[in-house]
Amino acid sequence: MALKIIDHGSFEYQQMVNLRLEILRKPLGLSFTPEELESEKEEILIGAFEDEKMLGCCMLIRADAQTVRLRQMAVLNNLQGKGIGRALMQFAENLARDRGYSRMTMHARASATGFYEKLGYEVRGDQFDEVTIPHYIMEKVLY
């Protein structure tokens, strides 16, 4: 499996949009607006690949000088639980550290908090709804 930063607008980026749409949005009856996709030009886009096929993805957004926010983590349904998400998280954390960030935060779906807790993330605050489903703010200090 190869992990890499992908370019906005590339073929790999289109795979990323399609994967996120299938895994994260369609099950909720949602899609992406052109404005949402356009705003991703400034974000660090990360993909996990086997040959040319995208297996999983996530993105990082600068929150402030010390903090980066993880968004849109998705792994193909039939490959969840096989270490792809863990590998994506390790790659994202290393990238964040290399770029000088000391903390990573996210809005984690309530159903995914156990996954992130195993990786050292902690829930901060109360549950809230985002994209129609329950979420928690989670964060981790990057050493």
Image: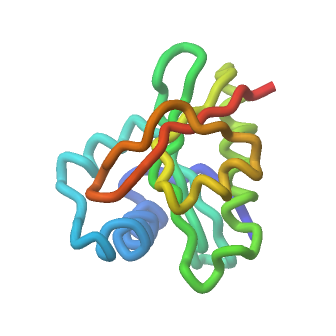
- Position of 109 relative to 50 (above/below): above
Instruction: Examine the image and state in which quarter residue 66 appears.
Output: top right
In-front residue for pair 62/24: 24
In-front residue for pair 143/9: 143
The picture places residue 141, in percent across and down from the top left corner, at 71, 26
Q: How many marks?
A: 0
Q: Is residue 14 left or right of residue 103?
A: left
Residue in view at x 73 percent, y 58 percent:
86
Q: Is residue 37 left or right of residue 100?
A: left
| Location of the N terminus (image quadrant) | bottom right
The picture places residue 70, in percent across and down from the top left corner, at 53, 42
In-front residue for pair 114/126: 126
- Position of 96 relative to 44 (above/below): above
Q: Residue furthest front?
A: 126
The picture places residue 129, in percent across and down from the top left corner, at 32, 48
Residue in view at x 18 percent, y 54 percent:
34
